[in-house]
Amino acid sequence: MKAKIYRGTKEIGGTCVELTADNGKILWVDLGAPLDDKNPNISYTDNKVDALLISHPHQDHFGLMEKVGTDVPIFIGEVALDFINATKLFINEPQLKGNYKTIKPWQTFTICDTFVVKSFLTDHSTPEAFAFLIEADGKKVYYSCDFRATGRKKIVYDKIVASPPKDIDLFLIEGTMVERANHIYLTEESVEEGIFQVIKNQRNVSFVISSAQNIDRLISIIRACKKTGKKVVIDVYTAWLLEMLHKQSSNVPTMDWGEIKVFEHPSQMERIAEKSFDDFRARIKVNSVGNAVFNVPSDFIYFVRNPSMKLVNELRKHGKINIIYSQWEGYLKEEHKQYFTDNINALKQDKDISYHSIHTSGHATVPDLMKFAKAINSSKIVPIHTAFPKKFKIEFEKEGFANIALWDDGKEYKI
Ligand SMILES: [Zn+2]
Ligand SMILES: [Zn+2]
């Protein structure tokens, strides 16, 4: 078997790994969209491929997957497929069409009669993310996916460390955090506590800014609300994501929970106007926040991408409004305007706003990466999904790892 990383040896974004078996069969693992590059070279997406395996529904891992066309089999988690279709529904794009084969956690399956794959659930900032053990030609590759050891699913990190797959020849491990650190909030529980401290005595409404797909974060808010008797207000899109997740595991919250209310965003309601959504729409009506926020604004926490200025302006007379920024600080930079950078930075300066930054990363810290790498005990470790591979190598070698190899994008290596 041979391996090639099309993108990702020196950047976060556009992750795509190619594995070629001795019989010529070609498997791609992830086909992500580049994150920063305005005019990225993605000509490799036209190359021959026999199957595609997607780790999780983040743009930098699946963003270009439709480029393989509708015939190539795409192996993807059930929740991932539902989440991507949910996003398409609410941005008014057609649902995915293609040769999708859905997979579950801890499932072993064969691709192209050649690659034997096992999916490992990982702890990440989306509810379903898979690492993969891929075997062919007597060789074993472990692809870490994005992961951490500090979220609500840290048990799966511990589980893999306690009984890791054996005899790995190549370990492709993410290295996002090599130049980053969690400073104040080290775990998802500490984020929950931080949010609790801000909202417990609030005089006015709070907004928590995060990704709707970061269900761990939503659960942190729900738990903080439970302790304070307050309610979290989600939009229709988030309510739909919870529906999708609830199909897979019944202990996931839904909008019917007492701590949850739904904001009937008019353009989102238009997206679910069809008859097939009748039941969902009816339940939204039952769980709608309505005008309650105007009566007692301090009872509510809005979970949003971008706080509504209309709501902020209507409520500012009640006292300080909390803005809790709960995602990566890097998104506040000029080049990430799609994250509503301008509005959020303006709110930061607003005299009626009390601004808080409460976040922990979806990615493993360097010590957690090392602990994991020790457990996997691969003959060779290649960092991927990192902007600082050299630093990765130096840090790991300092701790006694002698098997770190740095690869170049687009170059093929024999395993
Ligand atoms: Zn990623
Ligand atoms: Zn991710």
Image (cartoon, rainbow, N blue to C red):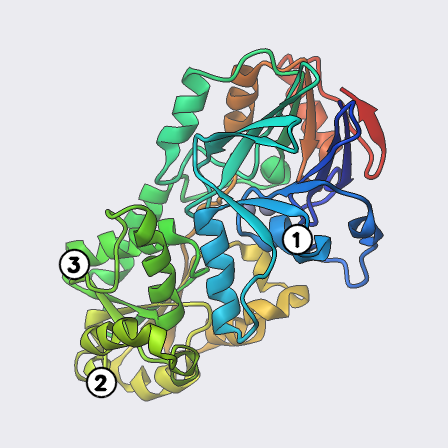
Residue at mark 3: 228
Q: Assign a secondary structure to mark 2.
A: loop
410, above or below 251, in the image: above
Mark whose residue sits in front, 2 or 3: 2
Inspect the image, locate mark 2, and give the three-letter code of the amino acid beneath it.
Asn
Residue positioned 37% across, 37% down in the render: 153
Question: Is 318 placed left or right of 393 in the picture?
Answer: left
Find the distance from the CA under tag 2 to the CA under tag 3: 21 Å
Label drawn at residue 399: none
- Kindly identify the residue that appears in the image at 57 percent across and 62 percent down: 96
Q: Is mark 2 within 8 Å of ligand 2?
A: no
**Earlier-in-chain disc, 2 versus 3:** 3
> Looking at the rendering, in which quadrant would you find the N terminus?
top right
Where does residue 321 sit, x and y in percent of width and height? 33, 74
- Where in the figure is residue 252, as x and y percent of width and height? 28, 50
Q: Who is closer to the viewer here, 139 or 394?
A: 139
Using residue 106 as the reference point, say whether residue 334 is left or right of it: right
The reply to whether discs 1 and 2 touch (Cβ–Cβ < 8 Å) is no
Q: Earlier in the sequence, mark 1 or mark 2?
A: 1
Between 95 and 320, the one lying in front of the other is 95
Residue 27, image quadrant: top right
Q: Which amino acid does label 1 sit on?
A: Met
Q: Name the residue under label 1.
A: 65
Residue at coordinates 36% horizontally, 72% vertically from top-left?
236
Label 1 Cα neighbours within 10 Å, binned few <14 / some 14-19 / many ≥20: many
